Amino acid sequence: MAKLTIDDLDLKSKKVLVRVDFNVPIKNGVIGDDNRMVAALPTIKHIIEQGGKAILFSHLGRVKTEEDKKELTLRPVAEHLAELLNKPVTFVPATRGAQLEDAINNMNDGDVLLVENTRFEDLDGKKESGNDPELGKYWASLGDVFVNDAFGTAHRKHASNVGISEAMKAAGKKAAAGYLLEKEIKFLGNAVDNPAHPFVAILGGAKVSDKIGVINHLIDKADKIIVGGGMTYTFYAAKGIKIGKSLVEEDKIDLAKEIMDKAGDKLVLPVDNVCATNFKNDAPSKIFEGDIEDGYMALDIGPKSVELFKNVLKDAKTVVWNGPMGVFEMPNFAKGTLEIGKFLGTLTDATTIVGGGDSTAAVKKLGVADKLTHISTGGGASLEYLEGKTLPGIAAVSDK
Ligand code: AMP
């Protein structure tokens, strides 16, 4: 990797500032899915083992009012992290000032400290989200080195990832990628820029407009692009296939035509669909091949499409998947997504990557996550990566 990584740093007795992504769901002080925290443990444990002092920064939710602070404190996250690490974690309920500085100065080698939600700084003129240069500079002044391990926010240009990196570099100090960031870049980067062929992309989810950047970027790189989910029916409309009351983006039909012309037989669409009379799990449903009857909406791909997609996927060496094949949240319309997920799990010769967001939720809910090579921790970030965009959080890390 062309970027400096945590393995390039001497961490002994160093104050190591780390941007993690601890933006986890919390209800009544209890953490829901802690996957993002678990994903950051290798970096934190490495710093502890090397005798560094780990000073962690993260955002949590969106802080718009003073009131939001009660709900969005990172205190429960610090407590949960202490359990995961099986060692004390000092929580500092401040994002700047004497309390934070004293706590850092009192750290011993191998200690871990978590700073309060970086977005508390947004109440005072969007300092965090607006990448206020003074804030980045101040945070950078608190440490000897910076490690960015927050892939989930890498597509954002905030003070706690980009500002701090720039300020470290300006001060002659280093900004490196942590293990999670390195892993995400390795898998997503290789898949997009240097894939083993055949390379098949599976794109689903609600809207064409959300995935258009990915389709355009992958059209020349992938050998096949499988389309499923709600965006299918805008392509159907472009082909003149009847779609009943299925989801459609009227203003994207011309674009869908352009994509089909450009992609030719690279683009693989479903041939049958599970359609219902209403957007409800227990609504009466029917499978249609091709034209969908008036009064029905397509909510999942049908069994023939599953077989067609499996056939396209069976020899793949690289698979990138973003977006479910249907309304997987409803059990009666989860089958297409489940079948594709399960089949990916059997492709032991292929690198199988799930690119964040709803597809990650889907493979976890369906219990196939551990059979796949890599599940990205970033929704928006992985999508932008697949679109070929430069992610500011990664760009700001020091070059090797
Ligand atoms: P995205 O965030 O773009 O990946 O979209 C995910 C959402 O698309 C999920 O909430 C799915 O329920 C929804 N979705 C997938 N297929 C369909 C469909 N055929 N009709 C309506 N919504 C769908």
Image (cartoon, rainbow, N blue to C red):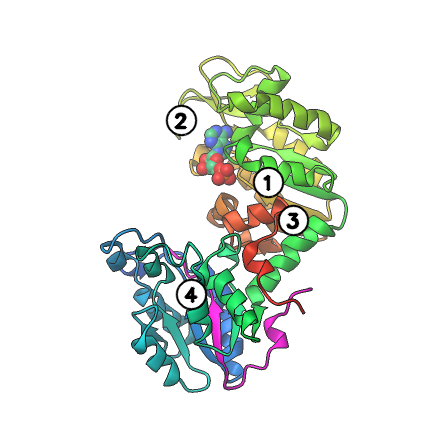
Q: Alpha-carbon distance for marks 4 and 2?
A: 50 Å
Mark 4 neighbour density, 10 Å: few (under 14) some (14–19) many (20 or more) = some
Residue 340, which numbered label?
A: 1
Of the image marks 2 and 1, the number of the one nearer the N terminus: 2
- Locate the C terminus and report the quarter of the image it occupies: bottom right
Distance from the alpha carbon under mark 2 to that under mark 1? 22 Å
Image quadrant of residue 26? bottom left
Foreground: disc 3 or disc 1: 1
Mark 4 and mark 2 lie on one chain; the one further toward the N terminus is 4
Q: Main secondary structure of the magenta part?
A: loop
- Disc 4 or disc 2, which is closer to the eye? 4
> What residue is drawn where x is 50% and y is 79%?
144
Q: Residue at x 49, y 66 (%)?
A: 164
> Closer to the N terminus: mark 3 or mark 4?
4
Nearer to us: label 1 or label 4: 4
Q: Is residue 4 in the magenta section?
A: yes
Of residues 107 and 34, the one nearer the viewer is 107
- Position of 252 compared to 310: left or right? left
Q: Which residues are the magenta region?
A: 1-24
**Amino acid type, residue under disc 4 in the picture:** Glu
**Mark 4 highlights which residue?**
134
Q: Position of residue 195 (x, y in %)?
A: 73, 50
Nearer to us: label 3 or label 4: 4
In the displayed structure, 193 sits above or below 34; it is above
The CA distance from mark 3 to mark 2 is 32 Å
